[in-house]
């Protein structure tokens, strides 16, 4: 069957190409159905408890997605006529931002005060407010002493303020529309008020920046990576023909995979958008192996057709095997709880198998049609790989324990890494979202929200004295936590209303004395509020629950989860009768980040077991499948061990590296072992000769593949988006370590096992001779 396929590829390459290009066109046509989704909710399955809790809180109260206009006057004082006028104008126009449902700022804050026996509720800085020195000082005094404003909408130093726009994003891919309007307003008011610096932050800008960064990398860095791969291949392989054919295979593999993904209804997101990069790596590796073996045979004097046929015969099983094992590795990502990572695994698995098929069909057909020139070389010519093979054989007794110590040492560091993420630090300081968010943190607060919904489980229960006292005690405790910058709570509103209803006497800044009084104050206050600035963001419809919203410093996921645990313990102890839900976008990502890393590790472990069994069947020896475990596992373990020395924190982006590099690592090991076994079984070589043959036949392909991929991923490591940058860097490190292990650990291990086997055989023969002599003497 294989021989017939090889003959067809060599004898009828044009017909093969036409058929394959027709199939690729059909597969690629599905690419029109691919869409890019930027909504952070896609990271959670529809049945995810995290998403269900978050949606429940959002439905009961109101959405918390926001755009924050951070306004910093050059003179360091927001309480000036010009700045307050600008804030009021921005506040009014912010209502025109698409999908906006609420705008909160210093100027439209609903300030309450007593007017004889009545309650007055009005904008803190209305359009007709005279901005005299006296009124400005009064506004400043109120703002800097109001718990709902200080460190939330105005800095304690009064050097900056925020106009916060709450938006209702009920569909995916709406962030770009909101961001476009916000940026238009930013440019407009910076031009109109040149003494003001305006920055954009908030969850909408953060989530949009994730998508923009991923798209930017795919538009800029991935093409650069592609170009680097092409240049290096030409330089190392010295073959324009082979490089051109490889580029064709890479492009058609990516087109086919993305098209088939579109046909199956998959969509692109931040993680899955990097699938073309991964497909590129495997397609390049497959082609280099076919090309390298073909050139090797042609150097020994064979014709192009004979050399290509021999290359296909030698590489058909290894390429099929590495592709299947790589697909298994990526399919293990279906263990992930996050749909985009499952999509990434499925798309790359499709691409890997397409690259396998095309490198064994279209690539040979192209090589038969295109001109190929290779100079014949003597078989015993001393090449770099032959010299390296001789060195490894001569120093095997030193290399084996040395490499074992290095592997063990770096692997020992692996568990020292912590599973952690800091979402703000995903962007380097050249990106606007990083600078604006850092400025907010330094002057007011971070952008991470933790929402705590506390339900009294009775209609109107929020006015109950015990309930209000519990909310107030909890809010005060919450404010004392080191991670917390601001707490927005209904208990502060009750205290302010109680003071207002007692002629603004500061002695009455405390909770109302009874339930009836609290309910009356709340009703009076709600009736006085303008449209869009009601209390729906704090209380639900039947007034059975309130939402306490804490704005946190830009802390890591580990710190966020630790704070959640403390909040849960406090409420379980101090408010056991109330129903509590704790949620927030960042908290959801902290949980999914932890669980995704853990599920990826378990999925990778299962994939390794399957790969081990498959290698045993394919290589015809379970002993060699067990031997392959070390060089298959060691590079990733060593890479993460080395990462501990560089960073020590493994986040959402790096969780992909183990599965991503597993394909390359297995590829190296399978090709090395298959050539080694070919020399032992088919050519009758002893262990040392087999090692020399392996280095000479496949060594060049392995190091060329390594250089090509390392340079390619090094380009990706320069991404401004830390998620992609770290992934590119650690992938490059892991690939280098894979080559080192396969060159300097695997051959000495094979030599050691062979020596033991020979010693055992010699011992057995000696025992048999002794028994035979004793028998004859008897």
Image (spheres, rainbow, N blue to C red):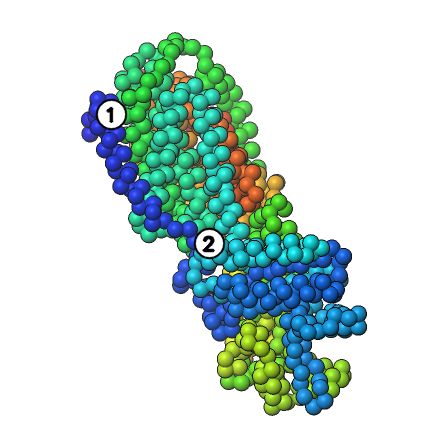
Residue at the limit of the structure toward the top, as seen here: 378
Asked if marks 2 and 1 touch (Cβ < 8 Å), the reply is no
Residue 568: give its label.
Answer: none
Q: Nearer the viewer, residue 57 or 23?
A: 23
Calculate the distance from the C-alpha at mark 2 to the C-alpha at mark 1.
43 Å
Task: Identify which residue, 363 or 207, lies in the foreground.
Answer: 207
Q: Earlier in the sequence, mark 2 or mark 1?
A: 1
For numbered disc 1, what is the local secondary structure?
helix
Residue appearing at x 52%, y 78% in the figure: 540
Mark 2 Cα within 10 Å, few/some/many (few <14, many 20+)? many
The total of numbered circles placed on residues is 2
Which residue matches tag 2?
38
Question: Residue at position x 61%, y 56% from top?
Answer: 188
At 54% from the left and 49% from the top, the residue drawn is 651
Q: Is residue 575 above or below residue 306?
A: below
Q: Position of residue 458 (x, y in %)?
A: 51, 84
On screen, residue 559 versus residue 267, left or right, reads right
Is residue 699 visible in the rendered image? The answer is no
Q: Can you give x and y, in whole percent of width and height, for residue 148 in the image?
A: 66, 71
Label 1 CA crowd tier, 10 Å (few <14, some 14–19, many 20+): many
Quadrant housing residue 13 = top left
Question: Which residue bears the numbered disc 1?
Answer: 13
Q: Nearer the viewer, residue 351 or 689?
A: 351
């Amino acid at each position: 069957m294989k021989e017939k396929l090889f003959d067809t590829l060599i004898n009828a390459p044009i017909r093969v190409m036409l058929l394959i290009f027709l199939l690729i066109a059909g597969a690629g046509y599905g690419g029109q159905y691919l869409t890019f989704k930027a909504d952070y909710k896609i990271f959670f399955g529809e049945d995810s408890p995290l998403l269900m809790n978050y949606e429940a809180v959002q439905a009961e109260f109101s959405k918390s997605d926001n755009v924050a206009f951070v306004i910093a006057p050059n003179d360091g004082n927001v309480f000036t006529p010009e700045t307050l006028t600008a804030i009021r104008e921005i506040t009014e126009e912010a209502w025109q931002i698409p999908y906006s449902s609420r705008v909160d700022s210093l100027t439209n804050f609903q300030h309450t005060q007593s007017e004889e026996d009545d309650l007055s509720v009005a904008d803190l800085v209305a359009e007709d407010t005279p901005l005299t020195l006296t009124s400005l000082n009064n506004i400043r005094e109120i703002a800097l002493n109001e718990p709902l404003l200080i460190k939330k909408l105005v800095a304690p130093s009064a050097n900056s303020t925020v106009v916060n726009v709450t938006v209702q994003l009920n569909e995916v891919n709406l962030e770009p529309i909101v961001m476009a309007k916000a940026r238009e307003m930013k440019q407009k008011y910076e031009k109109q008020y040149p003494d003001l610096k305006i920055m954009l932050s908030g969850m909408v800008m953060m989530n949009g920046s994730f998508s923009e960064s991923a798209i930017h990398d795919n538009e800029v860095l991935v093409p650069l990576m592609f170009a680097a791969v092409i240049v290096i291949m030409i330089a190392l392989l010295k073959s324009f023909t082979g490089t051109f054919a490889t580029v064709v295979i890479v492009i058609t593999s990516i087109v086919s995979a993305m098209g088939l993904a579109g046909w199956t209804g998959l969509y692109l997101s931040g993680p899955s958008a990097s699938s073309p990069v991964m497909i590129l790596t495997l397609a390049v590796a497959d082609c280099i192996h076919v090309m390298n073996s073909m050139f090797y045979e042609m150097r020994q004097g064979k014709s192009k057709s004979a050399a290509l046929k021999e290359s296909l015969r030698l590489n058909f099983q290894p390429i099929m095997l590495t592709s299947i094992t790589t697909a298994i590795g990526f399919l293990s990502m279906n263990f992930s709880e996050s749909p985009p990572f499952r999509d990434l695994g499925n798309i790359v698995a499709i691409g890997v198998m397409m690259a396998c098929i095309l490198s064994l069909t279209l690539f040979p057909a192209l090589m038969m049609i295109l001109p190929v020139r290779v100079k014949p070389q003597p078989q015993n010519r001393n090449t770099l790989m032959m010299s390296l093979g001789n060195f490894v054989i001569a120093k095997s007794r030193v290399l084996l324990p040395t490499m074992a110590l290095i592997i063990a040492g770096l692997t020992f560091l692996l568990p020292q890494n912590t599973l952690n993420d800091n979402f703000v630090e995903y962007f380097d300081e050249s990106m606007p979202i990083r600078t604006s968010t850092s400025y907010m943190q330094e002057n007011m607060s971070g952008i991470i929200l933790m929402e705590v919904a506390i339900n009294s489980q009775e209609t109107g229960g929020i006015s109950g004295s015990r309930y209000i006292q519990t909310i107030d005690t909890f809010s005060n405790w919450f404010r004392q936590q080191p991670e917390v910058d601001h707490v927005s709570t209904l208990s502060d509103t009750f205290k302010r209303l109680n003071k207002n209803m007692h002629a603004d006497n500061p002695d009455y800044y405390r909770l109302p004395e009874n339930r009836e009084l609290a309910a009356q104050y709340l009703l009076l206050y709600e009736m006085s509020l303008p449209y869009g600035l009601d209390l729906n963001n704090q209380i639900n419809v039947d007034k059975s629950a309130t939402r306490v919203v804490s704005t946190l410093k830009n802390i890591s996921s580990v710190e966020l989860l630790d704070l959640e645990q403390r909040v849960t313990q406090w409420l379980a102890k101090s408010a056991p009768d109330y129903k509590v839900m704790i949620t927030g976008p960042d908290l959801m990502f902290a949980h999914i980040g932890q669980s995704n890393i853990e599920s990826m590790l378990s999925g990778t472990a299962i994939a390794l077991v399957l790969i081990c069994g498959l290698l045993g069947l394919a290589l015809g020896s379970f002993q060699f499948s067990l031997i392959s475990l070390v060089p298959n596992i060691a590079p990733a373990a060593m890479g993460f061990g080395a990462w501990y020395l560089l960073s020590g924190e493994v986040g959402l982006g790096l969780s992909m590296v183990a599965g991503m590099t597993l394909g390359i690592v297995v590829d190296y090991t399978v090709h090395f072992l298959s050539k080694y076994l070919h020399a032992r079984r088919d050519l009758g070589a002893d262990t040392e000769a087999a090692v020399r043959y392996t280095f000479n036949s496949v060594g060049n392909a392995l190091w060329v593949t390594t250089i090509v991929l390392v340079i390619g991923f090094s380009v990706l490591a320069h991404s401004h988006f830390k998620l992609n940058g770290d992934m590119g860097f650690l992938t490059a490190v892991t690939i280098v370590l894979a080559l080192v292990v396969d060159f300097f650990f695997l051959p000495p291990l094979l030599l050691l096992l062979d020596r033991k086997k020979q010693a055992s055989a010699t011992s057995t023969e000696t025992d048999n001779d002794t028994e035979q002599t004793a028998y004859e003497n008897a």
